[in-house]
Image (tube, rainbow, N blue to C red):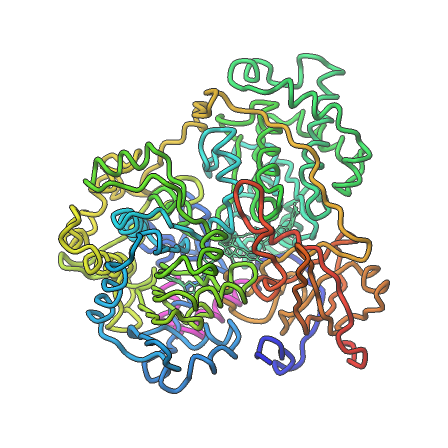
Amino acid sequence: MSSDETPDREGKWTIRPHKGAAAGLASIIHSVRHTAAEPGLLNGTRLLLQVNQVDGFDCPGCAWPDPKHRSITEFCENGAKAIAEEATRDRVTPEFFQQHSIDSLLKWTDLELGKAGRITEPVVRRNGDSHYERITWNDAFALCGEHLKSLSSPDLATFYTSGRASNEAAFLYQLLARTLGTNNLPDCSNMCHESSGTGLGEVIGIGKGTVTLEDFDHADMIFVIGQNPGTNHPRMLSALQSAARRGAKIIAVNPLREAALERFKHPQEAFRLLGKGTRIATDFLQVRVGGDVALLQGIAKAVFAAEASAPGTVLDHEFIQQQTAGFEAYKNAVQTQDWPAIVAQSGITQTRLEAIGAQYAAAKSVIICWAMGLTQHKHGVANVQECINLLLLRGNIGRQGAGACPVRGHSNVQGDRTMGIWDRPSEAFLARLDKATGITSPRHHGYNVVEAIQAMEEGKVDVFMALGGNLVSAAPDCERVGAALEQCALTIHVSTKLNKSHLHPGKSSLILPCLGRTEVDIQASGSQFVTVENSMGVVHQSNGKSTPASQELRSEPDIVAHIAAASLGKVTPIDWEFMIQNYDHIRDVIERSIAGFDNYNKRVREKGGFVLPNGARDRTFSTKTGRAQFSVHGLPNLAVDDDELILMTVRSHDQYNTTIYGLDDRYRGVYGQRRVIFIHPEDASERGLAPGQRVRITSCFDGKTRMVESFHIVPFDIPKGTAAAYFPEANPLVALESHADRSYTPTSKFIPIRVYAQDPSDTPLT
Ligand SMILES: Nc1nc2c(c(=O)[nH]1)N[C@H]1C(S)=C(S)[C@@H](COP(=O)(O)OP(=O)(O)OC[C@H]3O[C@@H](n4cnc5c(=O)[nH]c(N)nc54)[C@H](O)[C@@H]3O)O[C@H]1N2
Ligand SMILES: Nc1nc2c(c(=O)[nH]1)N[C@H]1C(S)=C(S)[C@@H](COP(=O)(O)OP(=O)(O)OC[C@H]3O[C@@H](n4cnc5c(=O)[nH]c(N)nc54)[C@H](O)[C@@H]3O)O[C@H]1N2
Ligand SMILES: [Mo]
């Protein structure tokens, strides 16, 4: 039995409902505790003072932008934890690998692997060996070169990226893949906001959001749909707080009543302000999991009704007529959708939806924000496009205070896509890249995450390389992913910390340790900075300042360039060595290759960086029709068997994706345990399940049953028929083949499950 299945050795765990406001003093105490415990108080505090400052490093936490007026405390609890995780004093050395075989490390949890510390030197696992062992950088690059050079087809290599890679690293990486001749560039975005990119691209002509941070100062209604900013984008709460104080309506749409949207106390004000904090959400719509298409159509239906009773006063007819297409079909579809179906699927009454519709009709400027609660569904693309439909009705796009705001996850995931980390790049992108670099990019599409895993299973991938990330824990059907990686001839992981993906080596496997965001990067011309793009299309610098965790570490651009040089040799028109001598050289090539980066080196040195062009922001819609497109979606089929519940997998307050900081989820009141399932008290009692009881959960997809054990019942305020558990512990329940239509985003928020008592003699938690 793996240690994942024996969580009780962590000792007692408790459920204690969260009281009072989110953030506030408690978050300061927590962040200080985390940073103080890891890099030592002084060093930790110094690090926190650099985060998100103009000349400091970009917070590796999330992609929320920095306000213009940065204060010294422009950090948040979870940003501090992300930094502390990187600045740990613990080290994973070659001696560590000598002591622990790969098999024995497989028994460690994600938490234990991460806590082992920073990897200090490159290591290799040679065919059949039980342990990783030290290898020199030169030998490591030569091994990569040998494999990549001898592929019978470039499509036998796959290059995965996680969204922390800088623009410079990502650009070189896609250049390596395309010079080699493949578009096999799956990335974490495929499992994340791909439904947003696909959905927005089709209807507004750009796969990005349209708002700026300043728009939040002008909106009088803000939707926050399927997102938990208190945990995942804490700095967004400042923007929401000031909007709430101005009297803006803030509508939270979520199956869970997420604490920070209820009450929030700004950490910077915690010492000054007594009292209960600001109420953020003015309305909370406890939607059923998967019920957002119905909910958004219900609101739109109410808007059409308002227009019908006062014609010409509600819809923005001029905008609709001049700049959109497909309005009549959409109007017809919404008006003929019947209320009982909308109410049944959304779980929200007609009266409430009409009330929100009336608020929307009266609001001058509306922003809709969303994250994983919308994208990780079979109908993820439809969810996103229904948000746009609603916005278009009143011209809430491309003007001050209004627009679409998909809130990105990883701190540079948006920048990576701009740099060409994409399995299906446009012809325009490739043509310009080829002209600028002298390579001939392949035109056929590459693998996304789902296809890459399937290809590995089928023996169609010889070399799998990962620039960051942890595919085995992050992807669905993790056991299959582990086995699939082991089929490769060579796996290459560029990583800061140990994780499960390293423990499923290909026949040969390399772990190449790299610098983190916080660390100084010295190349031939001296100290370098890198650049990143935030969730709102602002490109700016990130300057690591602290001493690297080990002298042996290399930067991501350095590692990628050396692998490229070893694999492509002199046949390539690119001088890889020259590129990394000074990252200005990389940025010069980016400037020539990618639209919007004119005067890159100059403009990125200006305070706060520069904003990338975004047509939709100026109401230039590069869609097929040249107009913003209304789209029609039927209500998705959400039917499950009578004894099934719908499970969504979510993040706790103490994790960064597969990096687990601790076992608490303060805002949801669970302490010391991650193997929990939140369910409605009646769903628990109908199954004879008591709080704390240990359960087995099964899911069934395409006739195959999947199972996890040793989860514990937590009765929760969640719609009946639905349940929640943490990612990545619940990932074995998610089927790889269950993904969103068109975007291939795994349906991590919609998993039909059954829950059974595991061992009836278990003592329930008291
Ligand atoms: N501290 C911290 N910060 C992070 C991360 C982290 O792990 N830790 N991860 C980063 C990344 S990569 C990402 S993508 C973002 C993720 O940020 P979020 O999207 O906020 O993350 P999730 O925990 O997946 O939460 C999704 C929310 O959607 C709700 N939800 C689930 N299903 C539905 C549904 O059908 N409809 C609606 N309306 N809501 C639903 C859940 O209750 C939950 O509140 O955060 C980024 N920031
Ligand atoms: N069930 C379920 N599954 C999900 C989700 C969900 O909500 N539910 N969410 C999905 C989402 S939104 C995402 S984005 C993916 C995340 O998928 P990934 O991005 O693949 O996973 P992470 O956990 O973010 O990656 C963590 C690893 O990155 C490495 N790392 C950290 N910092 C650096 C760095 O600076 N450089 C390099 N080279 N490596 C670094 C460390 O080794 C660490 O172990 O997971 C997805 N999976
Ligand atoms: Mo993400």
Magenta residue check for 33: yes
Which residue of the protein is positioned furthest toward the bottom in this rendering?
99
Q: Give above or below for 641 relative to 374.
A: below
Q: Give above or below for 262 relative to 83.
A: above
Q: Is residue 225 left or right of residue 99?
A: right
Q: Give above or below for 197 relative to 336.
A: below
Task: Report the label total.
Answer: 0
Q: Quarter holding the N terminus?
A: bottom right
Which residue lies at the image location 53% right of the left edge and 42% below the top edge? 195
Q: Position of residue 745 (x, y in %)?
A: 54, 48
* Foreground of the two, 440 or 503: 440
Q: Which residues are magenta?
A: 27-48
Q: Main secondary structure of the magenta part?
A: helix
Which residue lies at the image location 52% right of the left edge and 31% below the top edge? 401
Q: Position of residue 686 (x, y in %)?
A: 86, 62
Q: Position of residue 762 (x, y in %)?
A: 77, 80
Which residue of the protein is positioned furthest toward the front in this rendering?
152
Res 55 visible: no
Res 354 visible: yes
Magenta residue check for 727: no
Which residue lies at the image location 67% right of the left edge and 47% below the top edge? 254
Q: Position of residue 749 (x, y in %)?
A: 63, 52
